[in-house]
Image (spheres, rainbow, N blue to C red):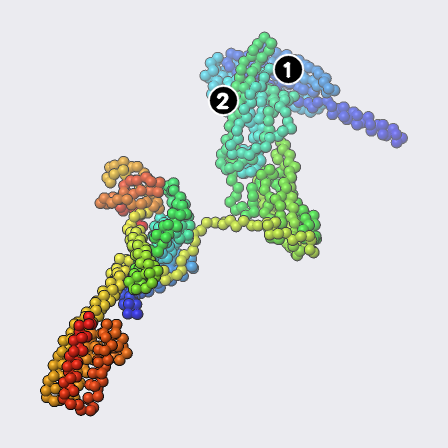
């Protein structure tokens, strides 16, 4: 009983902090934006969602911004926000569908390797819960491991003690796995590992130098993976696997 | 009288038909060369066919008369047709270069005056081709598209229209004109018609026509090689590529002849697109059509068949016409329509009718309506869309006619999205999160993660200490038991010397009880005779000593209330000391 109280004492302020004023404001703006979108007034919906996005984050606000930009014919912006929404829910059907429609409208058509169902499922499993989800799972596993080890420490029947020992061991191992996954989910969400081209036409260079050879030409709306950074230059890779360098300002990081 | 009247009428008709048999009178003038080179001679002929009269030649002062006029006449009768020609010919030589007009020749036949068309003769410089080329080019541009300098053969593609709407029919005629008596036509390469949908006239075979065609006053034999109806499919200037013929002229038994390649002109047609404001049910029909819908029955039982016929008849691009859309009630089973064409292709274009025949089976009884069926075509003459409608048709379906079909037999609509649009937004604001704040990696996260293990360790450590402490207390109590007992006995000895018997017995019983309590680890609350006996017995103490112990304790109790002799007190003291010694030796 004392233990439970102790956990609450630690956990309450963490979750309590989340419910702050900014978030309430963002929620009100979000609802206004939804109303405007429903009425077909996409310009004001855009302003509301943008303000909501400046105060909060998450799947819904990014997805709605993508939709609103799409309706206003801002294709590259809509692709950017859909990609950002995918960081929160990497296997969301709606985003994938809308993103495909948006990608049909851009200039570049890059041969993309189709992702298998298993791959998509794995991505969803790995990133879908986000770092916090995996963190909570890790904590639950930690509790389970300690309770099972506690059972082991008492002088119960050997069967129960064995269960306590192995159960505790497995829980501890799973907890380490969950922490690893939480870390990778955090990297996926926080690190800018890709970007969307935001200028109409970009010459992709062979080296991070203006005088170097043009090896690719990309157009607005194309998604690229960021592989390396060198001053103002990013080394990027497109879906077909080709690589090259471009200036940082031509790109908006996802 | 009646009979004679009939007879006269018969003769009258016979005469009439005979006169119809004689050929029509024609009158024309020709030259055998045009243009003419300076210094050459050419002949000018005026021909009167099927007539008799005095030919008045035109003024020929622009040319020097070399020979003539000479007159020749021909008469022929073939297959009961009689024909005669009277020809007046002049051989002329030009006086100077330039363009000269030979005026009309006139003749009076049976009181009617016939005139020939005037001929413009171009006279060009010398023998060189250079001078004539300009004229040649222009002339050829109109008739033969370059290539063969041979003016004796002309290949032409004639179009009956120079301007048409998309889908409006245009007739193309491929004509070969020649002045050679002997022309073997070899390979004919008709143009590939890009941008047109074509329909050939199949009933005609190419052959030389009886009539001469006069081009610039020069008579040519004429053959129509092919006729085609063209339907332009896209707007803009469409060019029909030229046609080519490989042929051989003047071949005879002795002469291998000469190979010629004849290239035709390549006419252009301006295709106008249809007006923008097309009704939604317009499906590309261009022409003049009549639209008719016919239903064979309107009252029937369920599962009986209805025949619905749609006839589209008229002139236009019938082969490209689709059935109008019909909205059938969903309980009707409708089979794909059977298309039945009766289409003629003639020089006037494509005409006829196209019939769509639907077989419809209502599956359930009830009152049904097929809404108005409308058909829209574009009329190129008026330049407007015209819509004709038929219906609506009402059907009364009665009774339980036969079996109700299983769901598998019923027609199903495939659901196909008509347009692509993005999916709707998310409307739940509870999904929002605070920016940059992440539970994972925060102090709280690590605290919560470590807490259970820390608590476990604390718990384990605490329990161990408590256990060891308990162990320790018992050991020291055991060790100290004898010492405390001895202390108490000393106090008892002091009390004995002072003759304080009450204090003496209290000390003795305290010493004994305290010793037993500590040494045997019995809590004070459980200190009773059977517990002590049991513990002592398990400690290998003889029954004799146990009895002695309880006797001593009893005496101590009694002495508190009833005073005793000092001698007894001394023996009790001795006894207690010896008991403690025995216990201390035996108990560990």
Q: Position of residue B92 (x, y in %)?
A: 57, 13
* Front one among A213 and B178: A213
* Front one among A13 and B153: A13
Q: Can residue A200 be seen in this view?
A: no
Q: Residue furthest front?
A: B544
- Label 1 Cα crowd, 10 Å radius (few <14 / some 14-19 / many 20+): many
User: Considering only vertical position in the picture, is A126 above or below B28?
Assistant: below
Badge 1 or badge 2: first in the primary sequence = 1
Host chain of mark 2: B
Query: Which residue is at 49% across, 36% downward?
Result: B236
Q: Is residue B196 left or right of A213 when viewed as pictured?
A: right
In the rendered view of the protein, which quadrant contains the C terminus of chain B? bottom left
* Front one among A57 and A108: A57
Q: Can residue B42 be seen in this view?
A: yes
Quadrant hosting residue B530: bottom left
- Label 2 Cα crowd, 10 Å radius (few <14 / some 14-19 / many 20+): some
Q: Name the residue under label 2.
A: B146
Query: Which residue is at 69% across, 55% downward?
Result: B400
User: Considering only vertical position in the picture, is B313 above or below B145?
Assistant: below
Q: Mark 1 points at which residue?
A: B88
Q: Which residue lies furthest to the bottom in this view?
A: B562
Q: Where is residue A95 in the image (x, y as percent from the top left)?
A: 39, 52
Q: Where is residue A242 in the image (x, y as percent from the top left)?
A: 32, 39
Host chain of mark 1: B
User: Marks 1/2: CA distance?
Assistant: 34 Å
Q: Position of residue B32 (x, y in %)?
A: 57, 16
Query: Which residue is at 28% across, 44% downward?
Result: A227
Quadrant hosting residue A113: top left
Q: What element carries label 2?
A: loop
User: Considering only vertical position in the picture, is A40 above or below B186?
Assistant: below
* Front one among B289 and B197: B197
């Amino acid at each position: 009983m004392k233990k439970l109280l102790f956990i609450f004492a630690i956990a309450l302020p963490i979750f309590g902090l989340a419910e702050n004023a900014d978030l309430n404001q963002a929620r009100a703006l979000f609802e206004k934006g939804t109303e405007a979108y429903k009425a077909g007034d996409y310009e004001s919906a855009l302003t509301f969602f943008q303000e909501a996005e400046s105060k909060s984050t998450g799947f819904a606000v990014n997805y709605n911004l993508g939709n609103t930009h799409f309706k206003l014919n801002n294709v590259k912006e809509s692709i950017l926000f859909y990609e950002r929404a995918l960081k929160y829910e990497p296997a969301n059907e709606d985003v994938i569908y809308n993103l495909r429609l948006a990608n049909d409208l851009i200039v570049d058509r890059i041969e993309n390797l189709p992702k298998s169902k298993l791959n998509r499922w794995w991505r969803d499993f790995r990133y879908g819960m986000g770092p916090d989800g995996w963190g909570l799972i890790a904590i639950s596993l930690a509790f389970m491991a300690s309770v099972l080890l506690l059972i082991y420490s008492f002088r119960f029947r050997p069967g129960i003690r064995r269960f306590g020992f192995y159960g505790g061991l497995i829980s501890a191992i799973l907890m380490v796995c969950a922490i690893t996954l939480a870390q990778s989910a955090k990297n996926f969400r926080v690190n800018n590992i890709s970007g969307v081209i935001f200028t109409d036409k970009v010459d992709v260079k062979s080296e991070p130098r203006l005088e170097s050879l043009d090896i690719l030409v990309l157009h607005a709306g194309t998604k690229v993976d960021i592989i390396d950074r060198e001053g103002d230059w990013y080394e990027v890779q497109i879906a077909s696997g080709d690589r090259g360098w471009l200036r940082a300002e031509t790109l908006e990081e996802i | 009288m009646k009979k004679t009247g009939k007879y006269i009428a018969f003769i009258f008709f016979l005469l009439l038909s005979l006169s119809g048999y004689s050929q029509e009178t024609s009158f024309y003038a020709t030259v055998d060369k045009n243009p003419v080179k300076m210094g050459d001679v050419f002949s000018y002929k005026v021909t009167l066919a099927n007539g008799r009269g005095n030919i008045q030649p035109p003024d020929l002062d622009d040319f020097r008369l070399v020979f003539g006029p000479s007159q020749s006449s021909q008469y022929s009768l073939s297959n009961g047709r009689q024909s005669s020609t009277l020809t007046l010919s002049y051989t002329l030589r030009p006086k100077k270069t330039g363009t000269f007009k030979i005026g009309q020749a006139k003749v009076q036949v049976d009181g009617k005056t016939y005139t020939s068309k005037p001929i413009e003769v171009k006279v060009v410089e010398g023998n060189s081709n250079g001078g004539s080329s300009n004229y040649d080019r222009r002339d050829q541009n109109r008739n033969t598209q370059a290539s063969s300098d041979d003016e004796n053969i002309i290949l032409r593609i004639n179009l009956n229209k120079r301007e048409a709407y998309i889908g409006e029919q245009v007739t193309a005629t491929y004509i070969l004109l020649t002045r050679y008596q002997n022309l073997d036509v070899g390979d004919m390469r008709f143009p590939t018609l890009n941008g047109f949908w074509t329909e050939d006239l199949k009933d005609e075979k190419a052959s030389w026509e009886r009539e001469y065609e006069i081009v610039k006053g020069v008579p040519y034999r004429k053959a129509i090689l092919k006729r085609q109806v063209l339907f332009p499919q896209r707007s803009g200037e469409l060019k029909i590529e030229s046609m080519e013929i490989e042929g051989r002229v003047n071949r005879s038994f002795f002469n291998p002849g000469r190979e010629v390649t004849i290239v035709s002109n390549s006419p252009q047609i301006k295709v106008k697109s249809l007006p923008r404001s097309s009704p939604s049910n317009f499906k590309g029909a261009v022409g003049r059509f009549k639209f008719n819908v016919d239903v064979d029955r309107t009252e029937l039982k369920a599962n009986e068949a209805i025949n619905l016929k749609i006839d589209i008849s008229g002139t236009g691009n019938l082969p490209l016409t689709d059935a109008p859309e019909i909205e059938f009630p969903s309980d009707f089973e409708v089979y794909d329509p059977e298309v039945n064409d009766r289409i003629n292709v003639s020089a006037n274009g494509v005409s006829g009718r196209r019939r769509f025949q639907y077989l419809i089976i209502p599956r359930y009884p009830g009152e049904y309506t097929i809404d108005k069926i409308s058909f829209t075509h574009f009329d190129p003459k008026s330049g407007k869309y015209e819509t004709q409608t038929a219906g609506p048709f009402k059907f009364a379906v009665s009774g339980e006619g036969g079996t109700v079909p299983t769901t598998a037999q019923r027609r199903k609509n495939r659901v196909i999205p008509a347009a692509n649009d993005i999916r709707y937004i998310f409307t739940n604001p509870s999904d929002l999160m605070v920016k940059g704040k992440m539970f994972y990696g925060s102090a709280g996260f690590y605290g919560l993660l470590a807490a259970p293990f820390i608590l476990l360790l604390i718990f384990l450590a605490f329990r161990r200490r408590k256990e060891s402490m308990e162990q320790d207390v018992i050991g020291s109590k055991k060790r100290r038991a004898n010492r405390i007992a001895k202390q108490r006995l000393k106090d008892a000895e002091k009390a004995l010397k002072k003759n304080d018997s009450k204090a003496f017995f209290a000390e003795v019983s305290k010493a004994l009880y305290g010793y037993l309590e500590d040494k045997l680890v019995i809590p004070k609350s459980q200190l009773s005779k059977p517990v002590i006996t049991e513990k002592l017995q398990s400690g290998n103490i003889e029954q004799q000593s146990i009895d002695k112990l309880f006797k001593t304790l009893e005496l101590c109790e009694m002495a508190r209330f009833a005073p005793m002799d000092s001698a007894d007190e001394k023996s009790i003291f001795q006894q207690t000391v010896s008991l403690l010694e025995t216990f201390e030796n035996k108990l560990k």
